[in-house]
Image: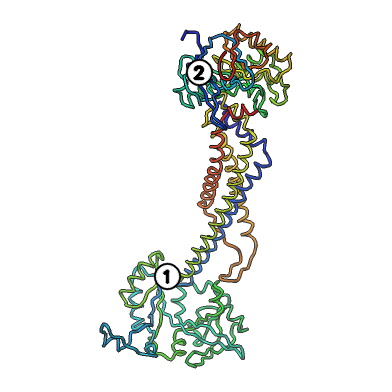
Amino acid sequence: MTDQAIIKTQNLNKNFHDPVEFQALKNINIQINQGEFVSIVGSSGSGKSTLLYVLSTLDTDYTGHIYFDGDDLSLKTKNELAEIRNQKIGFIFQFHYLLPEFTVLENICLPASKLAKYSEEEIKDRAYKKLDLLGLRDQALKKANKLSGGQQQRVALARALINEPKIIFGDEPTGNLDSKNSQNVFDIFKELKEQFNQSIVVVTHDMSFANKTDRIITLKDGEVI
Amino acid sequence: MKKNPLLKIALTHLFSKKRQTIVAMLGVTFGIAIFIFQAGLMSGFQDFFIQETVNTTANIRIYNEAEKNRPSILDKINHQPNHWNAVQNQKPKDEQSKIKNGYQIISILEKDSRVAGVSPFLGSQAIFKVGIAQIAGRVSGVDIVKENILFDVSKNMKQGNITKLETIPNGIILGDGLADLLGAKINDNISVVSPLGVNLDMKIVGINHSGLTDVDKSRAYINIRNAQKLLQVDGSYITDINIKLKDFSQSEELAKFYNSKFGFRSIDWKEANASVFSVFKIQNMVTYLIIVSILVVSGFGIFNILMMIIYEKMPDIAILKAIGYKDRDIKIIFLTESLIIGTSGGLLGLVVGFFMQKIVGSIRMDIKGFVSMEYLHFNSTPGFYLFAFVFGIITTAVAGYIPARKAAKVDAIDIIRSK
């Protein structure tokens, strides 16, 4: 394992048992380095989303090893994994999953309030900085469900960034966006990578998006090809 | 001060379902209010009744219990195994129910430092006649001054004066119900006929109202000497000795003591009213059963609304878990919601219960039944409020715990994948 690796897998396998026995991931050995912008592609059912959930600690039902920032995830408890997600991982989903009754600012602050490393004032300050970065400062006090889809996705991105994670996982982050907004999100990812040396892993079926990333991991029937 | 995001999330959930939240809250309010009202009413009534009973029943009553299942003489002299004796139609022994040396026992009791008052008593069935009106009842032959120490008879006098029972040789004090039935008024003359056929003409010197309807309909006080005349017995003949203690909680213990000391049956007021207390027990059981089921129903209300919120907020739960909120945090959110409903509903219930008692307690009822009272009596000890509130909170916590646990177990990927 090199110093740069943020994620490394060793003989990673995953089976679904219900409704029928089905091997979703077969012997995956990959490594993702700090500051790398990687996309995972494959046809639907190839196991790309499953891989993302396993890598991002949400899914713990696997065999083999995943080393995250040097730690073996299979040895961690559920609560420890929640802490890792809180401190070191940022998520963006196809459906942005903002809390609709909360303001943009409150949504962004949620992971930081949980971490409770900084005072409430400082958290707000940081949230505004992220909003500036994404050009959303003027929307801060609006309810999340009053924003357009593209704006909501950028809010989700700001929320993913608030605790300054080591890695950002995106599950079809542009799947629901038009080409203009999707280009916008890509530009932000690129900027994060270049300016902050941020690691980014994105699952996508949009090949034009994938082709612009540093590296493409292609899955077919649960295997890396 | 740090804002707790969990509390804010909980509140947001409740506000997003205002109507259901209010209904669930009112469920608890209703449960607690009924609890306080009902428990206060029941216990207030029972306290009132006990007080009336304590006022009208002697702390200890000593009397001569007639032996009923007397063994036959044959059984006594010819008692062998494998033999049986048949004596048919055996009649009770002609035994007087008099307390032997009654007045000596009274003077001993009067010297006892634990005793506040002793009153001799001679009771009999009697028929009261005014013209053609005839009512069966009971006469209580008493020494009215001593009786007054025990039962505060003068407090219950509606008309007349108790001392006239002493000063007027043939005076009688009727219960107000009895006087109504006879159509008799104070200073009227009535005839009292004993089971032995002795007829005394008496003058009504007072009307008495004890509050116990049955007693007021049938009892008359007369001087103990007149009672002895009615029963054609000598001047030392008494059937009961009633005792008032300085501390009535000693009743049970002292009743046992006198029982063995004087050899006559002594019972305390609790034993004398045992049937009433067993009715109270059943009454309490039914009351608490109803109250508990109301609270359980309100618990279901809370359960219901939380389940609704959880199903609706699955994506919220999933994202909170994804961004690092632990299972415990999720559980806290939903438990907080149920406790908010429970606490606010409960506090409101306490207030509503309090005013329900006050309002109903201020309505004039004039109940005449088992006991007669003008207003309903409520027992509003803080204990009931505390108990009701604590019980309400426990119910809501239990009702909230099951959905909260379910929410904590939600698998985030299941939700994210299924979208």
Where is mark 1, residue-wise?
B271
Colouring mode (rainbow / by chain / secondary structure / one colour) = rainbow
| Residue with the mark numbered 2 | A27
- The residue lying toward the viewer, choosing from A100 and A66, is A66
Q: Chain of mark 1?
A: B
Q: Are tags 1 and 2 found on a single chain?
A: no
Please say whether residue B39 is visible from this viewpoint: no
Identify which amino acid the numbered label 2 is placed on: Asn
Chain label for disc 2: A
Q: Is residue A34 above or below residue B366?
A: above
The quarter of the image holding the C terminus of chain B is top right
At which x and y percent is residue B340? 59, 39
Instruction: Give the secondary structure at mark 2.
Output: strand
User: Residue placed at 60% from the left, 71% from the top?
Assistant: B368
- The image quarter containing residue B261 is bottom left
Q: Residue furthest top?
A: A194
* Distance between mark 1 and mark 2 Cα atoms: 84 Å
Q: Mark 1 or mark 2, which is nearer to you?
A: 2
**Looking at the rendering, which quadrant does residue B396 occupy?**
top right
Q: Nearer the viewer, residue B371 or A223?
A: A223
Residue B246, image x, y percentages: 40, 66
> Mark on residue B399?
none
The three-letter code of the residue at mark 1 reads Glu
Tell me the element at label 1.
helix
